[in-house]
Image: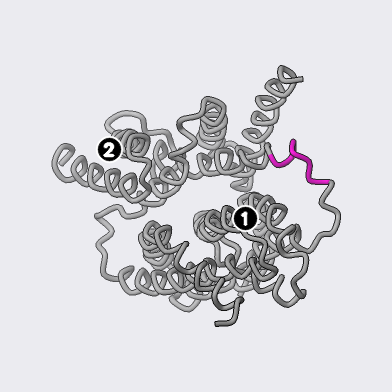
């Protein structure tokens, strides 16, 4: 039952991160400086999920050679930068990944 | 029509284009959750109780890796810190609302709703303008619950050989697409990614996400500070 209480706590954290600033009266504490740094939160957190999922194998060790995920990510990134389209980024990555694992590395 | 309802519908219409990428994200979450051995009910409960894509994926990854509760909670807290920024921006537009509506709208305040409502709120001064966020968020809620459910069903059908878990880093990569054009963001991205990858085995308690994010945010502080000094 640990997972249930964890889910509820995570829900509360998520809710209060949204609610706290709306309910808070003292907004002066949120300077432009803090706003600017907070705008970097996605760039600071998402790579911590992305990089290990690409460069590490299921055992958790580095896999830099013959790794189809690296090639597929590079393609997805280029498509993403050019198209600025979320769907195009995801699907170009998936399709090129399948191409690498089923055709090239097979 | 009642002005609250009208603004609510305007929120639904405005947010609709942003729902397209939510569809694969929700399905991937459902599939992954079932793959990792969580029950359909727990999976659905996560989407309803937490209602935040990034938080839920991080929860799954850390939970299945056997991370401690403290690490899971602090990592989810870190991912959520961006919502505080949304709250700050929106609070000016919601100061007239009753606490009940503040609670309801807070629950529905997701990235997509904030993105479309932010520009709407700046251009309108109707006292009920915050209902635009409610419309956008409620739309996102329905799409998220439906796609989670589809993912739960597909989870038992999709063969593991397809490596669909690779869609997770791709989804987050897609969310960073705009940031790849800015040098400071690229530096922050590389710092975070390298520390997480190298720290994965070394950092105790699977706290690598927190350590990487804190270091990267500290880097962002230094990078933005130097610009600020130049401007002064």
> For the residue carrying disc 2, how many other residues have a C-alpha within 10 Å: few (<14), some (14-19), or many (20+)?
some
Report the chain holding disc 1. B
State how far apart marks 2 and 1 are (Cα).
29 Å
Where residue A68 is drawn, which disc sits there? Answer: 2
- For the record, the magenta segment spans A29-35
The answer to whether B87 appears left or right of A28 in the picture is left
Report the chain holding disc 2. A
Query: Above or below — where is A64 with respect to B105?
Result: above
Where residue B76 is drawn, which disc sits there? Answer: 1
Please tell me which residue is depicted at 60% across the width and 37% down the height of the picture.
B212
The answer to whether B109 appears left or right of A62 in the picture is right
Give how far across and how far down residue A43 sits, in percent: 55, 38
> For the residue carrying disc 1, how many other residues have a C-alpha within 10 Å: few (<14), some (14-19), or many (20+)?
many
Image quadrant of residue A2? Answer: bottom right
Give how far across and how far down residue B1 sits, in percent: 55, 82
Give how far across and how far down residue A103 sits, in percent: 13, 42
Give how far across and how far down residue A1 sits, in percent: 61, 75
The answer to whether A50 appears left or right of A67 in the picture is right
| Secondary structure at numbered mark 2 | helix
Please tell me which residue is depicted at 46% across the width and 38% down the height of the picture.
B178
Q: Please state, as top left, top right, bottom left or bottom right, where the C terminus of chain B lies in the image.
A: top right
| Secondary structure at numbered mark 1 | helix
| Residue B101 in sight | yes
Image quadrant of residue B221? Answer: top right
Q: Nearer the viewer, residue B66 or B153?
A: B153
Please tell me which residue is depicted at 70% across the width and 20% down the height of the picture.
B226
The answer to whether A86 appears left or right of A5 in the picture is left
Query: Above or below — where is A85 with respect to B217?
Result: below
């Amino acid at each position: 039952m640990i997972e249930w209480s964890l889910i509820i706590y995570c829900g509360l954290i998520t809710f209060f991160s949204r609610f706290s600033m709306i309910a808070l009266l003292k907004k002066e504490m949120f300077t432009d400086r803090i706003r600017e740094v907070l705008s970097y939160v996605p760039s600071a957190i998402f790579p911590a999920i992305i990089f290990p999922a690409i460069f590490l194998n299921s055992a958790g060790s580095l896999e830099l050679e013959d790794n189809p995920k690296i090639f597929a990510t590079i393609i997805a990134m280029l498509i993403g930068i050019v198209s600025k389209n979320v769907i195009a980024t995801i699907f170009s990555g998936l399709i090129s990944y399948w191409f690498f694992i089923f055709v090239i590395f097979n | 029509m009642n002005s609250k309802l009208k603004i609510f519908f305007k929120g639904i219409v405005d947010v609709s284009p942003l729902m397209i990428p939510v569809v694969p994200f929700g399905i991937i979450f459902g599939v992954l959750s079932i793959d990792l051995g969580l029950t359909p009910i727990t999976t659905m409960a996560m989407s309803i109780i937490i209602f935040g894509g990034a938080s839920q994926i991080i929860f799954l990854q850390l939970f299945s890796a056997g991370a401690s509760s403290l690490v899971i909670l602090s990592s989810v807290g870190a991912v959520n810190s961006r919502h505080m920024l949304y709250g700050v921006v929106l609070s000016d537009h919601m100061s007239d609302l009753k606490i009940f509506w503040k609670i309801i709208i807070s629950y529905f305040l997701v990235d997509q709703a904030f993105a479309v409502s932010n520009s709407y709120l700046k251009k309108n001064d109707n006292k009920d303008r915050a209902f635009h966020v409610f419309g956008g968020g409620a739309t996102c809620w329905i799409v998220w619950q439906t796609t989670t459910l589809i993912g739960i069903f597909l989870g038992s059908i999709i063969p593991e050989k397809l490596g669909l878990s690779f869609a997770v880093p791709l989804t987050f990569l897609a969310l960073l697409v705009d940031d790849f054009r800015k040098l400071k963001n690229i530096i922050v991205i590389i710092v975070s990614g390298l520390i997480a990858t190298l720290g994965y085995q070394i950092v105790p308690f699977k706290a690598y996400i927190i350590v990487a994010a804190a270091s990267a945010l500290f880097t962002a502080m230094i990078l933005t500070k130097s610009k600020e000094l130049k401007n002064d």
